Amino acid sequence: MSDVLDTPTRITVTAERTYDVVVGRHLLGELPGLLGKNVAKVLIIHPESLEATAQAVREDLLEQGYEALLAVIPDAETAKSAEVLEFCWQILGQADFTRSDAIVSIGGGTATDLAGFVAATWLRGIAVVHIPTTLLAMVDAAVGGKTGINTAEGKNLVGAFHSPVGVLCDLAALETLPKWDLVAGLAEIIKIGFIQDPVILELIENRSDEFTRWPEVSDQMWSVLRELVERSIAVKAKVVSQDLREASLREILNYGHTFGHALEQVERYSWRHGAAVAVGMVYAAELARLAGRLGDEDVARHRAILKSVGLPTSYRGDKWKQLLSAMQRDKKTRGALLRFVVLDAIGSPSRLEGPDPTLLAAAYAEVSHDETSPSNAIAL
Ligand code: GLY
């Protein structure tokens, strides 16, 4: 990766507090500035696989005069549980963390969601800095203050809005990102492109070949990836600055998610989130087309761009009953009406409330394939 990428970019979010998302490389020196002057102790929450990174952060903080402790959490989604939450509370309690101390999360969306919720709940809220290490966490989970854990009743049903005091997106962490983690992150970036920033779509369309060769990519490709990260964060920063609590505008970030979440549930979470959202975006595009709101070419563009980076665009055709009932249970549904984010044009999202059941089923038919044909999401 070229050194020209080292100069950091700052994107400001103004939600319940104002904070910077810093994008660049070798950003550890930025951490004390984000933590602020009054913090004495820091709990670094990280998955086992990021032990070396967490140790490096700890040593750096010790050198800067902080007291720094580590909390190791499971690598998998199981980290987002009441047991792990309690384990973190125990460490904070035993080390006498006060309101002026802080948490640092290192990892993917699981780590940022869990650590964010630990910070939201300890003493009714202490500071947290997120250091996301996956593309998905950089452009989505780490920015915007959504935190939470899963329960037996479902994913993310328990949580809080708790904005971080800063986010460090170190692009060097992406150098070792497995290909399917890159692809899963691209799904959310493409989503941002469709709802708000069509330049994102052009950047990906012009380079989709190179993405498929990941991690063998050129320096020029790294600057494209950086631009994609920055553009995606800029959109998210703008949206959550206007509507932190998802009263209205923030809902656009759920483009593709109503069908996508239902698919994830029906598949018992064996699909990657990005893959499910990819099919969900094609479903939403078909729904908009059938409702007379989106043109054929824009729907075709959904399929083309998602396929070009290796994301799935269809799903088995024999699951409608289960999908519909999962969509009706979705936590984003308000009252009895099913709601979808749809596009009136690329970059122009709106809402479709209570669509006719025949329209819903017809859109499903458009994204269905024969249930015996292999799904290209299995590799994801
Ligand atoms: N991941 C959607 C949001 O942050 O609102």
Image: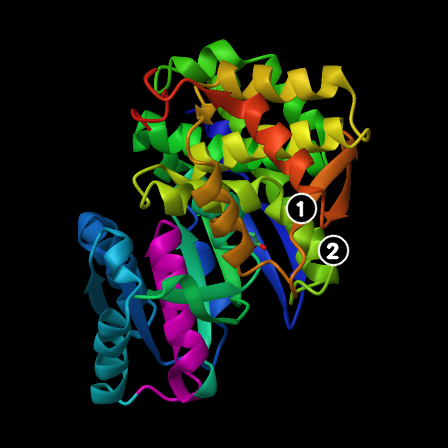
Amino acid type, callout 1: Phe
Identify the element where label 1 is drawn: strand
Direction from residue 135 to residue 50 in the image, left or right = left
Task: Provide residue 369's location: percent of width, then percent of height.
Answer: 45, 19
Task: Provide residue 150's location: percent of width, then percent of height.
Answer: 35, 64
State the scheme by which the image is colored: rainbow
Query: How many residues crowd mark 2 within 10 Å: few (<14), some (14–19), many (20+)?
Result: some
- Magenta span covers which residues? 97-123
Marks 2 & 1, CB-CB < 8 Å contact: no
* Residue bearing the label numbered 2: 249
**Which of the marked residues, 2 or 1, is nearer the chain's N terminus?**
2
Residue 155 vertical position relative to residue 8 in the rendered view, above or below: below
* Residue bearing the label numbered 1: 340
Q: Residue at x 33, y 29 (%)?
A: 380
Q: Residue at x 30, y 26 (%)?
A: 378
The answer to whether residue 344 is magenta is: no
Query: How many residues crowd mark 1 within 10 Å: few (<14), some (14–19), many (20+)?
Result: many
